[in-house]
Image: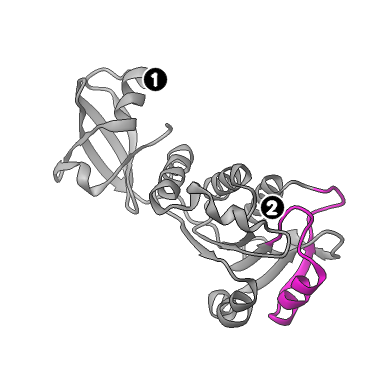
Amino acid sequence: MNLLLLQSEDFIDSRRVRVGGRRLTHLREVLRPAPGDALRAGLLDGPLGTATLLHLGAEGAEFAVQLDSPPPPPSPVSLVLALPRPKVLRRALRAATLLGTKEIHLIHSWRVDKSYWQTPLLAPQRLREELLLALELARDTMLPRVLSHRRFKPFIEDELDAIAGTRQRLLAHPGAGGDLASARGQPLILALGPEGGFIPYEVECFGQRGFTPVSLGERILSVEVAVAMALGVLALA
């Protein structure tokens, strides 16, 4: 836990908080702060600052907080990701969150097994917990939006244009000739396929919506590595 991530219900008053649950366990068993120690802290969807320990007990930990710094700037990249296997999805979401992505669209495609949509990880509370853990690692407070689209054609035909807006549109695809690095620092939306990539029909559908195919190199990458590599390249100033 690189950041004590606070939520509105933690506040006893405007300058004092009380935390419990998983965060308390981590404080007691891992960080082991003493009264007077200051920890990095932040308010979910709000500012960063410090939390100075007042009391650490079995039932809770109380801190005096001063939150007066902005969170790190978000990535200008929104991600469209064909839903991977649940274990891979967890790693991909963590990578995207660590790299500052704030908008993630999970979509169906021909190579996505329908059973993947039944994973408990997509339950709102479980998904939120995973994103909070990643925010703590990244020392960030701004919660990403993760939206699910279970039908490929309606997403492409009815929703994608409005989601992408005027941003540059890129499709990471094996064998493409475009240069991903040339889009660094620009507001854009990036589509990444499943293991094996999008099928030709799906690539054509994205192309009809103005998506330019770009390459991630000659190597064949797993989904979580492709997510981290692509977003990392685009995050470099």
Q: Quadrant of the N terminus?
A: top left
Height in image: 119 above or below 57?
A: below
What is the magenta range? Answer: 192-220
Q: Position of residue 182 (x, y in %)?
A: 74, 63
In the rendered structure, which amino acid carries the disc numbered 2?
Answer: Val
Q: Name the side, left or right, on which 124 lies relative to 13.
A: right
- Tell which tag, 1 or 2, sits nearer the viewer: 1
Residue at disc 1, secondary structure: helix
Q: Name the side, left or right, on which 73 lies relative to 84.
A: left
Q: Residue at x 83, y 48 (%)?
A: 220
Q: Earlier in the sequence, mark 1 or mark 2?
A: 1
Q: Which residue is mark 1?
A: 30
Q: Which residue is mark 2?
A: 233
Q: Residue at x 43, y 33 (%)?
A: 2
Asked if marks 1 and 2 touch (Cβ < 8 Å), the reply is no
Q: In this view of the protein, which residue sits in the foreground, 189 or 158?
A: 158
Q: In this view of the protein, which residue sits in the foreground, 169 or 129?
A: 129
Q: Quadrant of residue 197?
A: bottom right
Residue 204 magenta-drawn?
A: yes
Q: Name the side, left or right, on which 85 lies relative to 52.
A: right
Height in image: 17 above or below 197?
A: above
In the rendered structure, which amino acid carries the disc numbered 1?
Answer: Val
Q: Quadrant of residue 193?
A: bottom right
Neighbour tally class for label 2: few under 14, some 14-19, many 20 plus, Cα within 10 Å: some
Q: Position of residue 132 (x, y in %)?
A: 41, 44
Q: Residue at x 49, y 53 (%)?
A: 122
